[in-house]
Image (spheres, helix red, strand yellow):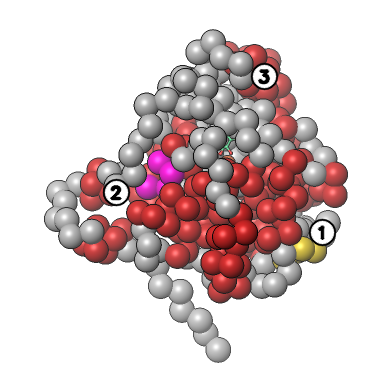
Amino acid sequence: MTITIEEPQLEIAVEEKGENPSDPKELLLDGGFVVPDSNAFGKTFRNYDAESERKKTVEEFYRVNHINQTYDFVKKMREEKYGKLNRVEMSIWESIELLNEFVDESDPDLDEPQIEHLLQTAEAIRKDYPNEDWLHLTGLIHDLGKVLLHKSFGELPQWAVVGDTFPVGCGFDECNVHHKYFKENPDYNNPKYNTKFGVYSEGCGLDNVLMSWGHDDYMYLVAKENKTTLPSAALFIIRYHSFYPLHKHGAYEYLMNEEDKENLKWLHVFNKYDLYSKSKVRIDVEKVKPYYLSLIEKYFPAKLRW
Ligand SMILES: O[C@H]1[C@H](O)[C@@H](O)[C@H](O)[C@@H](O)[C@H]1O
Ligand SMILES: [Fe+2]
Ligand SMILES: [Fe+2]
């Protein structure tokens, strides 16, 4: 039996809102969600220089992250250590519960356990896009790769799991957060890896680019290898949601192909909810759980290989 997966249409979502936009992206980004002026610590979002109780932890995180994420490291993690998915067997919901204990050290806007962030993201999307159930589920699972922090996954250090991502194998763009720490990365001075294109070529497509190792690419592999029926836009969101240099600053655009450009539109929609739903307002897990369990059942097998 062949299952055809229909790709979601961004334009349709606009029409359903009864609007006739000239720039769909802009209108969609205004889909009812009110973007807060400041985060839970009274600072603007993603302000890495603001004096706050999180600043030191976050900066130290990026220092170690930028020094250690090399081309060889990523290749090893992806191909040898984690790509085989032979570590654990568990359901999506079990993995959500594992995240209860972790606070992300790279995040200047949140010090709540990760499960809160997953539900806050998913519920905020659900409010504005009630018909796009695939996008609700994408919100719920996008950060599940952070299970790499857990001891049953080898207890990786935070620098190998969280934070913004960037391509390895080509020069590090200036717009990366705390860019100065790349100077101590061995690839920084390696002529094979430190030019604009490095080992890549123009328009080669992100699928051919190695990204710094962490929760995004890992969760993408888990979803894909376990044969999720989520559309390709969902897989793209999961895989590149931390690639702020691209989706916020437009850096590395020359590595994208046409399909990437299409999917990027959905990532822009998603990012608003991922970032600005971070708050101290808790979601009642038991209340929303049945809805999300039904989505998990629709798009994933009962047990997944991790
Ligand atoms: O600190 C955050 C956090 O780790 C998110 O999960 C990730 O997606 C972001 O890109 C990062 O900056
Ligand atoms: Fe993330
Ligand atoms: Fe997130």
Q: Earlier in the sequence, mark 1 or mark 3?
A: 3
**Tag shown at residue 31:** 2
Tell me residue 54's x, y (percent).
61, 19
Circle 1 Cα neighbour tier, 10 Å, few/some/many (<14 / 14–19 / ≥20): few
Drawn side of residue 275 relative to residue 16, left or right: right
**Tag shown at residue 88:** 1
**Tag shown at residue 57:** 3
- The quarter of the rendered structure image containing the C terminus is bottom right
In this view of the protein, which residue sits in the foreground, 157 or 102?
102
Magenta part of the chain: 269-273
Judged by depth in the image, the label closer to the viewer, 1 or 3, is 3
Drawn side of residue 72 relative to residue 8, left or right: right
Outermost residue, top direction? 51
Q: Are marks 1 and 3 in contact (CB under 8 Å)?
A: no
Judged by depth in the image, the label closer to the viewer, 1 or 2, is 2
Whole-angstrom CA distance, mark 1 to mark 3, is 30 Å
Q: Amino acid at mark 1?
A: Val
**Res 203 seen here:** no
Identify the secondary structure beneath mark 2: loop
Q: Earlier in the sequence, mark 3 or mark 2?
A: 2
Whole-angstrom CA distance, mark 1 to mark 2, is 39 Å
Identify the secondary structure beneath mark 1: loop
**Res 280 seen here:** yes
Tell me residue 90's x, y (percent).
77, 63
Q: Is 213 included in the stretch rendered in magenta? A: no
